Image (cartoon, rainbow, N blue to C red):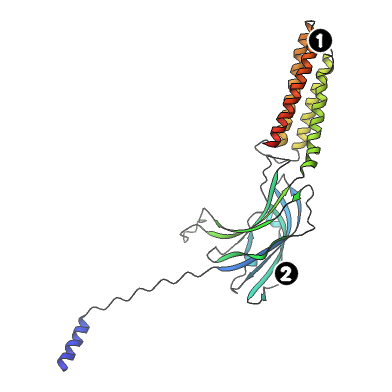
Amino acid sequence: MIRAASLLALLTAAAPPCAAAPKAPAPASAPDRVTVGAFLNDIQNLDIKTHSYAADLYLWFRWKNPKINPAATAEFMNAYELWGHEARPAYEKPIKRGDELYQVVHYQGRFAAKLDLERYPFDKQKLFIEVEDAQQERQSIEYVLDADGFTVNPNLRLPGFIIKNPTLTIRDNAYPTRFGDTALQTPSVFSRLRLEIPVERPALTYSVKLFLPVMCVVLCASLMLLFDPKWVDARVGIGITALLTIVALQITFNNDLPQVDYLVLMDKVYLTGYLFVIAGLAVVLKTTQVVDTGRGAAAARWEHRALGLLLAAFLAALLLLLIL
């Protein structure tokens, strides 16, 4: 009996130990959900020359983890002249709201929004404000829309613009770089909040303000083709004056716009006016040569037909510019 027990002990000691079962990897912790909402109180001084505007807004945050303070670490991603921004929390420290912490911050400052002016003055712009957490990535903090969402002051007015329905969206923003941090295996991904305010100019008002002067100059330039062909000096004077007037209008117009690498809609309208006047002067030159041959009546008829064709071409080109 003793020998059997000893043999059993010997066999047990000689047997290789069993490998320990591998531990299952710990599940990744879910990110802290931060509920956010916004109230836009005012927009001032939309400056298309600097592609910026001033805004007055409130952002509120609700979260559960007491170790974080997303209201203090929120960062504007399209701030303009950051030194002029102000942030005033409503409470010295986040306060309790049930099982959540709550803070609302009043922000004032200028924001950048690159404006596409190709269709100016009928362009439709989207003013926006983008917010990210300055410290925590998407795996740590996830923004969630509040039930109240995005509200705009019902008395908000932006002179010269019509404000459309605003939107508030949240998306994951992946950066194409690790910012030189060798500890990162993949580029950073942050939860990004985007407030968007669509605005557009009143079409009728701007049509009268910008198109009417050009139309008046073109109609006055048409007179050079209605005068008797023998009055060469008067007709050429009308054409040159009309041409210089359109140049002055365009220079004045461009003083209010930023430097862009494309032609805006009004530039194309002015170019159409240039072509009309230059073509009219070419007709005057040709009919003057016809008059010198003693065919004054034929020259007058040819001018009237040319005027009709030029006006039709100008109006057709103007319509195409507005439609396309």
Picture coordinates of residue 15 (x, y %)?
21, 80
What residue is rendered at 58% in x and 58% in y? 171
- Against 45, residue 288 (above or below) is above
Q: CA distance from mark 1 to mark 2?
A: 84 Å
Label tally: 2
Indicate which disc residue 297 carries. Answer: 1
Counting residues from the start of the chain, the first of labels 1 and 2 encountered is: 2
Q: Which residue is mark 2?
A: 90
- Against 251, residue 164 (above or below) is below
Q: Callout 1: few (<14), some (14-19), or many (20+) C-alpha neighbours within 10 Å?
A: few
Closer-to-camera residue (117/313): 313
| Quarter in which the C terminus is drawn | top right
| Quarter in which the N terminus is drawn | bottom left
Q: Secondary structure at mark 1?
A: helix
Picture coordinates of residue 123 (x, y %)?
70, 43
Residue most toward the top?
Answer: 294
What residue is rendered at 74% in x and 37% in y? 254
Picture coordinates of residue 205 (x, y %)?
80, 42
In front of the other: label 1 or label 2?
A: 1
Q: Quadrant of residue 26?
A: bottom left
**Amino acid bearing label 1:** Ala
Q: Callout 2: few (<14), some (14-19), or many (20+) C-alpha neighbours within 10 Å?
A: few
What residue is rendered at 75% in x and 13% in y? 286
**Amino acid bearing label 2:** Ala
